[in-house]
Amino acid sequence: MSPSWIDLNCDMGESFGAYRIGMDERLMPYITSANIACGFHAGDAAVMRRTVRACKANHVAIGAHPGLPDLNGFGRREMRITPDEAYEMVIYQIGALMGFVRSEDAVLRHVKPHGALYNMAAADSALAEAIAEAVYRVDPGLILFGLAGSELTKAGIRRGLLVAEEAFADRTYRADGTLTPRSEANAVLQDSVEAAEQALLIVRDGLAWTGDGGTISIAADTVCIHGDSPHALEFAIAIKQRLEQEGVVVSAPNLKPFSNR
């Protein structure tokens, strides 16, 4: 039986200075949660402020998207960091975005680590515990987004946080539930119809495709669309339309245990 709802989240606010990345304003009507870059892997003060305002105007739930301090690599290159460093980076970046959220009389709803930090925490329990602790210490009411079934979501649950298990409409998976690395073939879906069908497969059947054409089981509360993809808008429209055609309510997570599990 299909769950009654699913969240569609998108990584946003990734422009900085004179550089423009993504199409945030055009994507807003098709998503329900936004993960806003906090200045380490992308974003800057002006972009954070502008993106918070856009989220509020479009009734999109606001989340912090802390990443590694690697602007040149867009936060997608692994770095050797200690759990203490991960804890400090996450608190610093949540705090930066929270200032803009409060100044705009908005609400910070969730935290989702970005890129390599996200993938590292999915497998490394010590990093996962540090990130979960950082989120809890800033605000125990925040929802922690993480790869479905990962060390990060397990750490969040242990710490007493509400956790949104995340799946990806535009990525394939390995048999162990981790994402197929972008360096490998068939890691990223390039067709909006395929992405929409995978989103429906995730929501309706609890399955996702692997890089070799098989499937794995997955339980998700939120589905991600990558805002920096050249096909992001096309994908977002196709996914939202396909889900709603099948009677799925596309909505941000509520601050209560989720019904999709």
Image: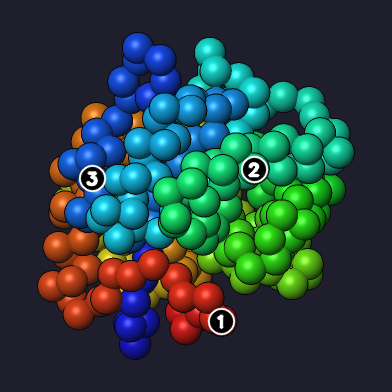
- Find residue 187 and report its image quarter: top left
Classify mark 1: helix, strand or loop: loop
* Quarter that holds the N terminus: bottom left
Return the x and y of residue 162 as percentages of the image width and height. Answer: 62, 71
29 w.r.t. 69: above or below: below
Q: Which residue is mark 3?
A: 27
Q: Marks 2 and 3, how far apart in space? A: 25 Å
Q: Is the residue marked by circle 2 packed among few (<14), some (14-19), or many (20+) residues within 10 Å?
A: some
Disc 2 target residue? 95
Q: Quadrant of residue 7?
A: bottom left
For residue 95, which quarter of the picture? top right
Q: Which mark is residue 257?
A: 1
Give the amino acid type for the residue marked by disc 2 in the picture: Gly
Q: Amino acid at mark 1?
A: Pro
User: Where does the image place residue 161, in percent across and percent down from the top left?
Assistant: 68, 68
Which residue is located at x 33 percent, y 54 percent?
56
- Residue 185 point in image, percent of width and height: 40, 31
Q: Amino acid at mark 3?
A: Leu
